[in-house]
């Protein structure tokens, strides 16, 4: 599902990506600084504590809402049926420049005995046009930079959302950058934003899209059956590459990209969950 909201206005001391609200700043401060002391031990001198304390309260009182940037995400706070609020992050799937922020939410179904996703299903079941949503300020540092270098946008599944936002921005700004859109999915029918991505690619003068489906290609040009395979694509070695998808997918593609001559420093990635990438970087 797509959810579009007008660019939100900031309430004083608005919530962070984790949904911490102004009334919780004092308690968060107490435990955060206790943990800092436990972890860093003697490195935390009184001067360090004073400096961090100052920064903490400066940030807590930060005023205006920062403008959304291409590639960022917002946190959405949702009231659940049990009366408890839960917060989840959703990437902006449009160019955030036109006064509207859009998120695209995949409904996480129950699978092999695991429960269905709580917040995604709650959003699908309860949110309708005209409803109000509680959002955080936009966060994230996987940003599209303004350079003219070639771009390779690689995604699997719902990892397409930040790529769609980037493409929308490129099309809206009349970019002439060479762009490769590479996407893997289970089926063409389950490929979110497929038609929109095709349309945006057609609007760009030097862009192409290649899609891989585990079950049955769509029959369109650039659509094939199988797992993503970058061999033979002749990707430019000076490209900036953005990756988003499940960790096993990103690890496999990263290996292929390095083999294709793209240096590791040119790869940026977004993980839709706890960032375990670094913990497993050696695998
Ligand atoms: C930066 C960022 C950007 C993101 N952008 C997007 C986006 O654009 N679009 C999008 O759809 N999602 C996005 N996500 C993912 C999103 O934030 C949520 O994680 C996703 O919607 C699932 O949330 P949920 O509450 O529905 O699932 P949850 O209830 O959190 O469950 C997640 C998974 O855990 C399993 N699970 C839960 N409890 C158990 C249990 N007891 N035993 C075994 N398994 C269990 C569930 O079956 C499910 O598969 C993003 C995440 C991040 C961090």
Image (cartoon, grey):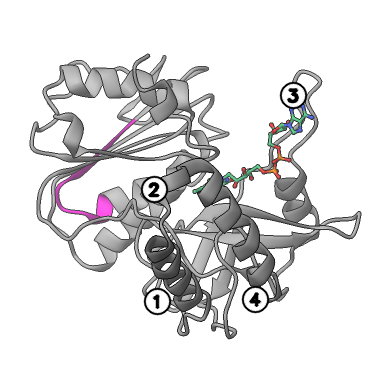
Q: Is residue 228 at least partly visible in the picture?
A: no
In the image, what residue occupies the spot 74% across and 61% down? Answer: 78
Q: What's the distance in space between the residues labelled 2 and 1, CA to CA? A: 46 Å
Q: Is residue 256 above or below residue 127?
A: above
- Using the image as rendered, state which of residue 35 and residue 20 is in the foreground: 35
The stretch of residues the image draws in magenta is 202-210
Mark closer to the chain start, 3 or 4: 4
In the image, what residue occupies the spot 34% across and 17% down? Answer: 282
Mark closer to the chain start, 1 or 3: 1
Q: Where is mark 1, residue-wise?
A: 98
In the image, what residue occupies the spot 18% across and 38% down? Answer: 266
Q: Position of residue 68 (x, y in %)?
A: 40, 69
Describe the element under mark 2 as helix, strand or loop: helix
State which mark lies toward you, 1 or 4: 4
Left or right of 176, for residue 227: right
- Using the image as rendered, state which of residue 251 and residue 129 is in the foreground: 251
Q: Where is mark 2, residue-wise?
A: 43
């Amino acid at each position: 599902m797509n959810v579009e909201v007008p660019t939100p206005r900031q309430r004083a001391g608005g919530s962070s990506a984790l949904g911490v609200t102004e009334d919780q700043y004092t308690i968060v401060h107490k435990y955060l600084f206790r943990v800092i002391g436990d972890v860093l031990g003697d490195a935390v001198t009184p001067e360090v504590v004073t400096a961090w304390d100052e920064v903490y309260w400066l940030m807590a009182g930060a005023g205006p809402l920062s403008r959304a940037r291409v590639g960022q995400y917002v946190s959405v706070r949702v009231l659940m049926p049990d009366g408890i609020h839960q917060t989840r992050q959703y990437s902006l799937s449009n160019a955030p420049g036109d006064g509207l922020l859009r998120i695209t939410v995949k409904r996480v179904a129950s699978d092999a005995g695991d429960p269905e996703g709580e917040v995604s299903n709650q959003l699908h079941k309860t949110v309708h046009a005209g409803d109000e949503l509680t959002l955080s300020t936009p966060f994230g540092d996987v940003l599209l930079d303004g350079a003219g270098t070639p771009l390779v946008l690689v995604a699997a599944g719902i990892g397409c959302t930040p790529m769609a936002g980037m493409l929308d921005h490129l099309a809206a700004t009349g970019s002439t950058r060479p762009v490769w859109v590479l996407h893997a999915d289970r089926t063409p029918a389950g490929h979110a934003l497929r038609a929109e991505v095709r349309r945006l690619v057609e609007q760009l003068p030097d862009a192409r899209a290649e899609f891989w489906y585990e079950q049955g290609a769509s029959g369109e040009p650039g659509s094939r059956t199988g797992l993503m395979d970058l061999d033979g694509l002749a990707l430019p070695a000076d490209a900036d590459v953005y990756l988003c998808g499940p960790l096993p997918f990103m690890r496999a593609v990263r290996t292929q990209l390095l083999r294709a001559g793209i240096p590791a420093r040119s790869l940026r990635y977004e993980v839709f969950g706890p960032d375990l990438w670094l913990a497993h970087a050696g695998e």
